[in-house]
Image (cartoon, rainbow, N blue to C red):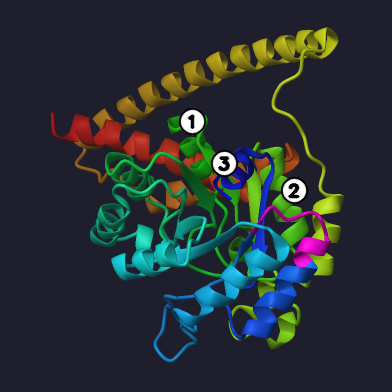
Amino acid sequence: MKDTIEKVWKKRPLIISGPCSAETEEQVLETARQLAATNQVDMLRAGIWKPRTKPGMFEGVGSIGLSWIKKARQITGLPITVEVATARHVEEALQYDVDVLWIGARTTVNPFSVQELADALRGTDIPVLVKNPINPDLELWSGALERLQKAGVKDIGMIHRGFSSYGNTDYRNAPMWHLPIEMKRRYPGMLLICDPSHICGNRHMLQETAQISIDLDFGGLMIESHINPDQAWSDSKQQVTPQRLGEMISNLVWRTEKTSEPAFLNALNQLREQINQVDDELLTLIGQRMKLADKIGLYKKENNITILQTSRWNDILERAFNKGLQLGLSKEFITRYFDAVHLESINHQNRIMND
């Protein structure tokens, strides 16, 4: 089985699927059979221990579920993966010869818990996937990876499952795509897969979100599947039947990062050079804007005026929203851009005020 694991780990795209929670032996085995029949799934997953946000929610069947998913591997020939949150979980998973482990978002957020897992994994050769922390903190995510690396874990991958955000959004967990992209930059060559189930929190957005991740060169997907999603004991709204999962995977457009086609490369290089020129112009203009902000800061200092002028800031945003709409720029982008510019302007004026 070790050779199979090594082959599957290197496969791109890597498709992992299975129920959010192992509920009964029959449910786990039948889901596994149907997933294997799609010929689209490379690895089976099932939640054995479920760290939940609130008490009283279903927290998993526990260790007995390991025997069910192990049996599912025997029946289907597919490797298996489970989530671990404590050293005891690691020990029991290894006893049942689980092929791959993953660390969940609620664990990644706690360095003490991650270190406990890293210590438990020391001396093993099992691959480990690490989900992003619930909150958008890349240092916590990086820290988890580095703790595993220092413990000697060789095969490490990342799972992007979205980030908790304040207020109502279309997503259960906001994708914030720029954050996993930054992790790809920091850890080139490390496996990064997407978990659209937890990003979306519903079924109808799964296909679209999965496609976005593939277009961003993610290395695979982890999607929850259940033989009867509406009756699932946890996260029923975001699970799909094995048949639907197979259809989704078949309908995805898989792209490559590179090509050797001369005409394409030539056209791409020309367009990228134009982008470089525009970027240079943008930076020059932003620099000029900061010089104007410095002058305004000096006038404010001389006249004992506060740095923040709320009414002026509101006027800037309103004007930018209207202009951005004409240019096809989203309100979300305009807000993020001007927030960054405004903060830098405030920093400039702060230095002038305290000089």
Name the amino acid type tagged 2.
Answer: Gln
According to the picture, the residue beneath numbered tag 3 turns out to be 6
Query: Disc 3 or disc 1, which is closer to the eye?
Result: 3
* Residue depicted at 28% across the width and 36% down the height: 347
Graded by Cα atoms within 10 Å as few (under 14), some (14 to 19) or many (20 or more), the crowding at tag 2 reads many
Query: Marks 3 and 1, how far apart in space?
Result: 24 Å
* Residue depicted at 69% across the width and 59% down the height: 77
Q: Is residue 45 above or below residue 157?
A: below
* Residue depicted at 79% across the width and 12% down the height: 267
> Residue lying furthest bottom in this view?
56
Sequence-first disc among 1 and 2: 1
Name the foreground residue: 19 vs 199. 19
According to the picture, the residue beneath numbered tag 1 turns out to be 185
Could you tell me which secondary element the residue under label 3 belongs to? helix
- Coordinates of residue 157 in the picture (x, y in percent): 49, 44
Name the foreground residue: 226 vs 92. 92
Name the amino acid type tagged 1.
Answer: Arg
* Residue depicted at 52% across the width and 56% down the height: 99
According to the picture, the residue beneath numbered tag 2 turns out to be 211
- Coordinates of residue 23 in the picture (x, y in percent): 59, 84
Could you tell me which secondary element the residue under label 2 belongs to? helix
> Which quarter of the figure is the C terminus placed in?
top left
Q: What segment is highlighted magenta in the picture? A: 35-43
- Is residue 280 left or right of 143 when viewed as pictured? right
> Residue lying furthest left in this view?
355
Query: Marks 3 and 2, how far apart in space?
Result: 26 Å
Sequence-first disc among 3 and 1: 3
